[in-house]
Amino acid sequence: MTGQGDFGRLRRVLLRHVRDAWASDALIDATWRALNYTARPDRKSAVAEYDRFVRILEDRGVAVELLPREEDLSLDAIYMRDAAVACDRGIILCSMGKEARRSEPAAIERLARGLDLSVLGRIVGTGLLEGGDVAWLSERTVAVGRGRRTNAEGIRQLRELLGDCVDEVIEIALPEVDAAGDVFHLMSIFSPLDRDLALVYPRLMPPALRDALKAYRIASVEVPDAEFDTMGCNVLALAPRVCLMLEGNPLTRARLTAAGAEVIEYAGREISLKGCGGPTCLTRPIARDRDADQGR
C-alpha cells in the first residue's frame, strides 16, 4: 500500500461528516455567505447526501475514518483533501490559503496519533499549500498548482519534506480565473483516472500540465465547457478507471464511459455544488494499492 498516488485502488480515507462540520442551522446562517457558498446549504438534506456518499465508499471496500466534531472549524472542514498531503512516510500538514480554514491542519494533527498516522512535517511561515493543488501523476511524480491557495514557498517546502519519496515535483502555474465560490485548485481542472488516463478541462489547462501529461504518456478525457461549473472535472478514482463523480454531468460521464471507465454517481447538491467541492475535495485518501498491485 502507498500514500502516494491518486488512482490506485482506494483503501483508506479521512472524512469529516457534514453533521459534525455543520453543527447547527445557526452556524450555517451565520457563515455561508462569508465562505462564498453559492447558496445556503440545507443541513438535513446535506446529512442525507453525505450518508449516501459514505455508503458508496464503504460498499467499494474503502475503510472510512470519520473525524470528530471540533468547535473552531468552518463549514469548509468537510473538504478534507485540502488540509493535508499524504506520502509513503506519512502526512504533511498544509497551510491554508483561505483564512477561514487556517485551523484545519492542526485538527488533523491532533487526531493523527489515534489514527496511527505519522506526521512527516508541516508547511510553515509564509508558505501556503492546499491539498487540492497537489495531484500525483505517478507514485514518484507529483504535480503542484501555484495560484491563489498555494504559493512558491509552500511548494518549496513540500518538495523538501517529500525528499526521496519522489523523483520529481512539477510546479504548474495556474491561470487567474473568477471561479464560482472563489475555489480554483489544480484538481478543478485535472483528475487522474489511471496511470495513463486523466480527466481534464482543456480551456484552462496550463502549458506545463499539457507538457507533463505528454511526457508521462497520459491520455486525456476532456470536460465540456457546459459542465465545468458543475464540477464535471472533479472526479475521484476509486481504482484504475473506476471513478466517483457528482451527478448532473451527463456529457462528461458519457466520455468517461467511452474511454473505458466505470462511473459511479452521487447526489451532492448540498455537500458539493453549493460549497464548490466535489468528491476529491470531500476526501483525504491516505492509503491506496500500489501501481504494481492493480493486476492490469
Image: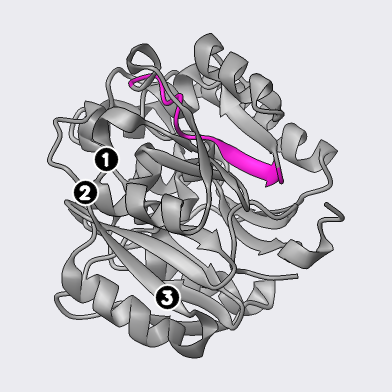
Give me the disc on residue 174. Answer: 2
Residue that numbered label 3 is attached to? 168
Q: Which residues are magenta?
A: 229-240
Tell me residue 186's x, y (percent): 34, 48
Q: Secondary structure at mark 2?
A: loop
Tell me residue 189's x, y (percent): 36, 37
Is the magenta region chiefly helix, strand or loop? loop
Q: Nearer the viewer, residue 279 or 175?
A: 175
Answer with mark 3 or mark 1, whichever residue precedes in sequence.
Answer: 3
259 lies above or below 216: above
State the separation of the CA atoms marked 2 and 3.
18 Å
Asked whether the viewer can see residue 267, the reply is: no
Tell me residue 46's x, y (percent): 53, 24
Answer with mark 2 or mark 3, whichever residue precedes in sequence.
Answer: 3
Q: Tag 3: Cα neighbours inside 10 Å, few (<14), some, or many (≥20)?
A: some
Tell me residue 24's x, y (percent): 43, 32
| Residue 259 among those drawn in magenta | no
With 197 as the anchor, is 188 left or right in this view? left
Residue 1 quadrant: bottom right
Asked whether the viewer can see residue 165, the reply is: yes
185 lies above or below 29: below
Q: Nearer the viewer, residue 28 or 240?
A: 240
Question: Which amino acid, mark 2?
Answer: Leu
